[in-house]
């Protein structure tokens, strides 16, 4: 009797838990759902219906306008060209910062030298410097090197800022690799870069995935550096999105805004879906293996 | 192949407090010898090995391979093959690639590499595993691959860093014998680090006992067992460990220090003053012996190992319980009293510093 009551209580707790989780999931998904609905309606439907009312028909006009026709400031070519800008920034910045991070991590974990721990600690500080603090000095520096308002300049800023994080990731991953692996390779006659290329990098897949997801998301979603350091034709998509939303002739086109925002968010979502499995695995790999 | 000569080798780890890991080690290793470094953890045996390999800098002294000083040579230039405790196989490469890695780096011809790898694989009976990845192998197989990777390049010197400590007991015995056989076949100078004294006793041509960065004794396994140079070696080598009894020596008359029963007995030593008498558990007798020191004890613990029985006896003659090893199965009653006899012929005597005193009846060293 007592036992069945207990199980009933436990069951109740369990369902309560599911309910709470369900509500939490709904709360998080709601904005996305509203965005999706709104992007598929026309202006008339938006004005007459409620936030949650379904669109009368699937209407992708807002999507195509956001992609290629909406006005972002002075030009009216949609966000398509800025998508290209973002990729031109993200791809080299992610690749280079990941590579440098891997090399740094390799040195800081496998080839320790006097003061290497201190150097690592100093690099970590880089993770905690707020973006705003470096805006002015960075602007001066980019101007000095003739990189102001260029894609190259923006890439350089993102690499510089990313190295602290990528170094942290790789260093902590490599600390978990057995040092004897490096010793064995040295006895086999392999040198510094050979060991890196042939032994260490092939074992780094999980942490490379983590690093790429992290960096891709950070750089793709960046607005502050984009708005400060880019010129009119080198703006990333986040800045274009802002301009699109703030540029209005007559009434606000919420459906176009939503469609543009969804498109701008799509690449990071795709990267996460494709590699998310590795992301979780990579983040915990060091902790479990020890 | 090469002989190895250590001349006053030092290793200091610089830091806030300098750590002197290896202190003035002098040692000669003959060409083709199988030498075992043994000692407790932190005694500097692995550091010494890594200095031979070139993985650690040498802080002071000279290291020679043959007539060549190798202090400043890279690991590769020294021609070292090393087997690690964790095997350290490259996880992303097949067994074949693991073994061929060093040869590929030497830019050997593909055909030569293939021939050598297959030859070594056949010796180690891993030729059917060549395409597998390390994670698909058992512990013993991984160990063989690690050994194969080390010998395929025909090194001057073989180094083993506790290679068997990750294996289970049965496999350990088997691999121990195989490594010994392999050494007989290849006759490469080998240095083997272990804390397992059975491995040391069974495999070594020469044992080097280390403690706190210093060499305590160098000798053949039986020299180490029969004539330990000091109380450290006497206590470290041999299982169960040697019994020590504090005595007062007056020439060849010894009187136990503690205890109520102060009998004097004669042993073939020449010493005056405080000393420590050492007797191995397997050398204590249960039947009266002429001239032996009789000790009255009480049985505290009995351990049955099957082939022998260990008796832990409490007595007022020494602080630790006296351990006696008896052949076969015995079931004496715990708490009953027992008189044991220490024959002078199997006694060791150490002076107040712990250094062994020479037996007067010892056969003169040639």
Image: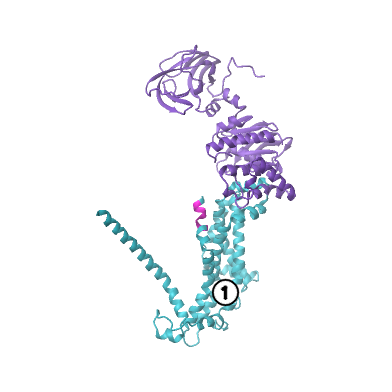
Q: Quick one: label 1, few (<14), some, or many (20+) residues within 10 Å?
A: many
Residue A44 visible in the displayed image: yes
Magenta stretch: residue A284 in it? yes
Q: Is residue B319 left or right of residue B6?
A: left
> Which chain corresponds to the colour cyan?
A
Residue plotted at (52% across, 15% down): B344
Residue B54 visible in the displayed image: no
Determine the main secondary structure of the stretch shown in magenta. Answer: helix
Give the position of the C terminus of chain B as an image quadrant. top right
Residue plotted at (66% across, 52% down): A192
x then y, percent, for residue B235 = 52, 27
Nearer to us in this view, A54 or A124: A54
Q: Is B348 located above or below residue B36 in the figure?
A: above
Q: Chain of mark 1?
A: A
Q: Is A85 located above or below residue B118 in the figure?
A: below
Residue plotted at (64% across, 32% down): B35
Q: Secondary structure under badge 1? A: loop
Residue bearing mark 1: A236
Q: Is A34 located above or below residue A277 in the figure?
A: below
Residue plotted at (61% across, 32% down): B203
Nearer to us in this view, B312 or B177: B177
Magenta stretch: residue B177 in it? no
x then y, percent, for residue B260 = 40, 16
Check the image and name the residue furthest to the bottom: A250
Q: Residue B54: name its quadrant.
A: top right
- Magenta span of residues: A282-288
> Which chain corresponds to the colour purple?
B
x then y, percent, for residue A178 = 57, 48
């Amino acid at each position: 009797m007592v036992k069945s009551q207990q199980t009933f209580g436990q069951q109740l707790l369990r369902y309560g838990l599911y309910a709470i989780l369900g509500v939490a999931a709904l709360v998080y998904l709601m904005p996305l759902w509203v965005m999706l609905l709104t992007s598929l309606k026309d202006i008339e439907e938006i004005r007459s219906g409620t936030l949650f009312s379904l669109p009368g028909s699937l209407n992708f006009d807002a999507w195509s306008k956001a992609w290629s026709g909406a006005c972002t400031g002075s030009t009216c070519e949609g966000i398509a060209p800025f998508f290209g800008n973002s990729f031109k920034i993200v791809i080299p910045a992610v690749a280079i910062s990941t590579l440098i991070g891997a090399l740094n991590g390799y040195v800081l974990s496998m080839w320790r030298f006097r003061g290497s721990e201190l150097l690592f600690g100093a690099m970590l500080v880089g993770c905690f410097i707020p973006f705003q603090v470096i805006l002015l000095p960075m602007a001066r520096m980019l101007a000095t090197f003739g990189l102001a308002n260029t894609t190259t300049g923006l890439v350089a800023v993102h690499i510089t800022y990313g190295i602290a994080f990528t170094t942290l990731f790789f260093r902590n991953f490599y600390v978990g690799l057995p040092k004897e692996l490096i010793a064995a390779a040295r006895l086999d006659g392999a040198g510094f870069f050979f060991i890196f290329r042939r032994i260490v990098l092939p074992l780094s897949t999980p942490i490379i995935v983590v690093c790429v997801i992290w960096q891709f998301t950070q750089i793709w979603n960046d607005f502050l550096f984009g708005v400060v350091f880019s010129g009119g034709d080198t703006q990333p998509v986040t800045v274009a999105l802002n301009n699109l939303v703030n540029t209005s002739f007559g009434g606000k086109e919420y459906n176009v805004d939503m469609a543009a925002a969804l498109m701008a968010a799509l690449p990071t979502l795709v990267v996460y879906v494709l590699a998310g499995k590795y992301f979780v695995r990579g983040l915990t790999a060091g902790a479990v293996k020890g | 192949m090469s002989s190895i000569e250590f001349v006053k080798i030092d290793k200091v780890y610089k830091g806030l407090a300098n750590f002197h890991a290896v202190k003035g080690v002098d040692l000669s290793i003959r060409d083709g010898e199988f030498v075992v470094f043994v000692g407790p953890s932190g005694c500097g045996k692995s550091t010494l090995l890594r200095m031979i390999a070139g993985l650690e800098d040498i802080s002071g002294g000279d290291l020679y391979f043959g007539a060549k000083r190798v202090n400043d040579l890279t690991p590769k230039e020294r021609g070292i093959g090393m087997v690690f405790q964790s095997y350290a196989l490259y996880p992303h490469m097949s067994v074949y690639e693991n073994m061929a890695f060093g040869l590929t780096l030497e830019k050997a011809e593909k055909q030569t590499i293939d021939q050598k790898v297959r030859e070594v694989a056949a010796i180690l009976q891993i030729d059917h595993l060549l395409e597998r990845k390390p994670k698909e192998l058992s512990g013993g197989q991984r160990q063989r691959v690690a050994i194969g990777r080390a010998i395929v390049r025909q090194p001057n010197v073989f180094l083993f860093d506790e290679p068997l400590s990750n294996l289970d007991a049965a496999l350990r015995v088997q691999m121990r014998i195989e490594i010994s056989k392999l050494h007989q076949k290849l006759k490469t100078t080998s240095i083997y680090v272990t804390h397992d004294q059975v491995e040391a006793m069974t495999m070594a041509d020469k044992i080097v006992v280390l403690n706190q960065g210093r060499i305590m004794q160098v000798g053949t396994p039986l020299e180490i067992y029969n004539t330990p140079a000091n109380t450290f070696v006497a206590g470290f080598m041999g299982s169960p460990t040697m019994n020590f009894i504090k005595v007062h020596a007056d020439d060849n008359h010894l009187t136990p220090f503690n205890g109520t029963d102060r009998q004097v007995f004669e042993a073939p030593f020449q010493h005056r003053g405080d000393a420590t008498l050492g007797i191995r558990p397997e050398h204590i007798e249960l039947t009266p012996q002429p001239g032996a020191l009789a000790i009255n004890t009480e049985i505290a613990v009995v351990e049955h190992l099957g082939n022998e029985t260990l008796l832990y006896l409490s007595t007022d003659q020494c602080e630790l319980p006296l351990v006696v090893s008896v052949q076969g199965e015995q079931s004496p009653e715990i708490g009953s009293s027992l008189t044991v006899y220490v024959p002078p012929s199997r006694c060791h005597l150490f002076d107040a510093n712990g250094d062994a005193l020479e037996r007067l009846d010892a056969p003169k060293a040639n």
